[in-house]
Amino acid sequence: MLKYDAVIFDLDGTLTDSQSGIFACAEYALKKMGLPVPPEATLRRFLGPPLAESYMKYCGMTEEQAAYATDLYRERYIPIGWKENRVYPRIRALLSALKERGAYLAVATGKPEHTSVDILRYFGLLPYFDAVAGPTPEDLHADKGRLIARVLPKGRRAVMIGDTAGDVKGAQDMGIDSIAALYGYGEDSEVLSQGPMHAVKTTEELCRLLCPDMPEAKGCFVTLEGVDGCGKSTQAKALAERLSQFGYTVRRTREPGGCPIAESIRAIVLAKEDGGMCAETEALLFAAARAQHLKDVILPAVKRGEIVLCDRFVDSSLVYQGIARGLGLEWVREMNRFAFQEGRPDVTLYLRMDHGEALRRRLAVSQPDRIEQAGDTFHAQTEAGFETLYRLEKDRYLAVNAAKPAQEVTEEAFAALFARLLKGGVL
């Protein structure tokens, strides 16, 4: 049974960390006005109070200057800044668990209501909430108690969660319990001085308090595959950042490599001078590196509930050594039995691109390694090989057109991956 069946959250500093976006927009306005940017400790004071008030108090502006600075702040915030949020870890899983157990969920925030709804929608959190209350153009000075009143249901055991003294006081004004989110922006001493019913230092503590029987974090093993030069490394970096923004703990790695022993093997198999390495040796070296990588990095991270993003995995061996080198798929599968039994990827993002165009892109920015020097026939075979695997395993593969501009590829890949994670209960 839940301790509270109506849970009201603040937004900034409780559900999401909006610090980077606020800092960037505050700096943007100051620089456009030709004014010095204060140190980070001062910028942190911008988190919470009205912008104009902060500009006057901490930057010595007049009321007129502060109004202009606020307009400049919004010049960047409206198209970009509001997306520079980060959902706190485990928040999505907590919301899901509470909702599954019949809790009423709401947001009461000092951030403008329309912006709050946009943020919750963008980060996939809006469907969990029954109501959202924030200042409207007609109600710019609503205090936290009045905001809570707008979303407070009758006949339920309610609690307000927030990171500021105002959140605690607002809850007290409405006669409900409060939880101080000490992981947020508020000064701990100020928040605690208001006498909250509970205080938590991490979102994990919050989960245990609100929903002690919720499941542990579920991990996921995601691989990126495709021909040389299709942009796997670029997309792995971009996707890792986006997933982190959405509240996931991400471990980015690569093959061959990812741990000390596997990195040593990488230096051998990708060296420009191969010393006459035969296809069988190449395949066995990849398999050896993979076995160590799985044991040392991938399996432990997934068990901890992390999202592992791996640039290449056993599919590459099937394609490069099994098909393009002519060793056969069954031979390669046997050499990688451990990987198939214990480390089969949950999801594979397949970056589809013509092998010729991909290799031209690759060679335009760096020198080719030993495998990239193999010739057009070899690379044509790798493209055909990935297409074959894609047709055989469409349940695991998510195909993305990698010939598009990198940002468009990221958007398409993330949308597909995020939907797959939610479907699989990876929250």
Image (tube, helix red, strand yellow):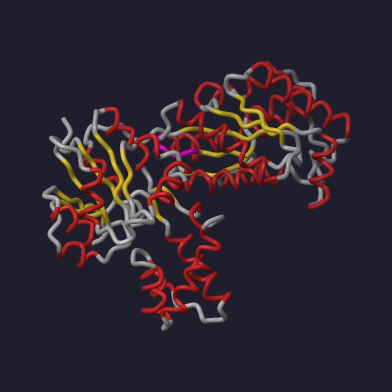
Q: Quadrant of the N terminus?
A: top left
Tell me the residue at 42%/44% (across/down). Answer: 120
- Looking at this view, is 272 or 44 the one in front? 44
Q: So how many labels did they put on this image? A: 0
- Furthest residue toward right: 376
Left or right: 273, with 126 as reference point:
right
In the picture, which quadrant includes the C terminus? top left
Residue at image location 76% in from the left, 33% down from the top: 353
Indicate whether residue 190 is drawn in magenta.
Answer: no
264 to 377, vertically: above or below: below
**x and y percentages locating residue 17 in the rendered image:** 40, 55
Question: Residue 281 placed where, x, y %?
Answer: 73, 31
Give how far across and how far down residue 204 sits, in percent: 29, 45
Specify the quadrant of the image occupied by residue 39.
bottom left
Question: Which is more toward the observer, 148 or 314?
Answer: 148
Identity of the residue drawn at 47% across and 79% down: 65
Horizontal placement of 205 versus 405: left or right?
left
x%, y% of residue 13? Answer: 34, 56
Range of residues picked out in magenta: 303-307
Q: Nearer the viewer, residue 222 or 38?
A: 38
Q: Principal SS element in the magenta part? A: loop
Left/right of residue 427 with respect to residue 200 in the rendered view: right
Q: State whether residue 50 is above or below residue 148.
A: below
Q: Does residue 304 show up magenta in the picture?
A: yes
Residue found at x 14% / y 55%: 173
Residue farthest front in this picture: 138
